[in-house]
Amino acid sequence: MSAAYLINRTQSLILDGKTPYELLFGQPPDLGLLRVFGCLAYAKNLFPTDKFDSQSNRCIFVGYQFGKKGWTLFNLDTGEFFKSRDVQFVEHEFPFGDPSFL
């Protein structure tokens, strides 16, 4: 899904310098939603059990949602994949690139 998302927003010589997204929707894509794959992200904890729970979950960005604004994340603490819109990205830190970070 990430590869298709990026390909649809990349200019092509075959399409006279336009993107597939632009041909389909008639306007250039919003590139402000692009993020660095594999970077550290903090997703808001939507279901805290008490007031002392952490406000966010430490995650890794792994992709984009299809047809919606949001991102697919891997939770480093629980080992689960989930989707969220409330995310803060740290695009210069890569948890799997540094073995001592985990």
Image (cartoon, rainbow, N blue to C red):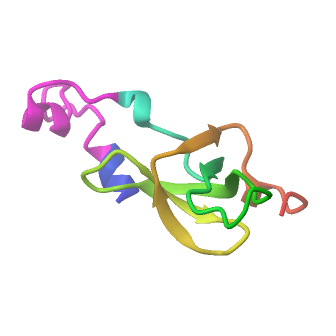
In which quarter of the view is residue 87 placed?
A: top right
Is 16 contained in the magenta span?
Answer: yes
Question: Where is residue 67 shown, x and y percent of the image?
Answer: 24, 52
Question: Where is residue 64 shown, x and y percent of the image?
Answer: 40, 53
- What secondary structure prevails in the magenta region? loop
Is 22 contained in the magenta span?
Answer: yes
Q: Is residue 99 left or right of residue 3?
A: right
In which quarter of the view is residue 92 placed?
A: top right
Residue 31's place in the image compared with 80, above or below, is above
* Magenta range: 7-30
In this view, the residue farthest toward the right is 100
Does the rendering let one see residue 39?
A: no
The residue that appears at 31% across and 28% down in the rendered structure is 30
Q: Is residue 24 left or right of residue 17?
A: left
As rendered, which of 48 and 23 lies closer to the eye? 48
The residue that appears at 80% across and 58% down in the rendered structure is 52
Quadrant including the C terminus: bottom right
Residue 2's place in the image compared with 17, above or below, is below
Question: Where is residue 31 shown, x and y percent of the image?
Answer: 37, 29
